[in-house]
Amino acid sequence: MFTKDVVDKISRWFKGSLLPFLGYDNANEWQFQVPTDIPMQENQVDCALFVMKYADCLTHGDCFPFSPKDMAHFRHRTLLDIYEGSLFQPEFRAKQTVK
């Protein structure tokens, strides 16, 4: 679980760097919440998968409908997405092209 120190550092970065970079004038209006009713990582190798699944759930409005037992499936699915090149949407690929 996050310690108060870690939460404070993330909050400072979010409000001091990310939100101003994205053009938000008053970052102090944003609430920083740390949910406790979400699936938790049970090993030391699935961190990236959990981050990706959390981001996926947040962007789609899901309620974290997965558990640590699902990580083997997500690892396989992520491998296939990367292999097939379907991880990124076409509009993002164009921006990533080196000129």
Image (spheres, rainbow, N blue to C red):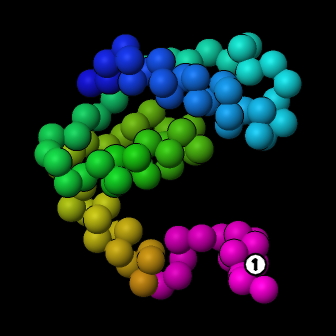
- Say how many tags the image has: 1
Q: Residue at x 73, y 13 (%)?
A: 29
Q: Is residue 86 magenta?
A: yes
Q: Residue at x 28, y 71 (%)?
A: 76
Q: Is residue 87 left or right of residue 43?
A: right
* Image position, residue 61 (x, y; %): 57, 38
- Tell me where the magenta segment starts and ends, as one range: 84-99
* Image position, residue 89 (x, y; %): 66, 70
Q: Is residue 54 left or right of residue 79?
A: right
Is residue 44 in view from this perspective? Answer: yes
Residue 91 image-quadrant placement: bottom right
* Image quarter in which the C terminus is found: bottom right
Q: Is residue 47 left or right of residue 85?
A: left
* Image position, residue 64 (x, y; %): 40, 37
Front position in the image: 73 or 44: 44
Q: Secondary structure at mark 1?
A: helix
Q: What's the residue type where badge 1 is placed? A: Ala
- 94 versus 41 height, above or below: below
Q: Residue at x 34, y 54 (%)?
A: 49
* Image quarter in which the N terminus is found: top left
Circle 1 crowding by C-alpha within 10 Å: few under 14, some 14–19, many from 20: few
Front position in the image: 92 or 60: 92
Q: Is residue 9 left or right of residue 18?
A: left
Q: Residue at x 44, y 77 (%)?
A: 82
Q: Is residue 1 magenta?
A: no
- 15 versus 92 height, above or below: above
* Image position, residue 16 (x, y; %): 68, 27
Residue at the left extreme? 43
Write down the residue under mark 1. Answer: 94
Is residue 37 in view from this perspective? Answer: no
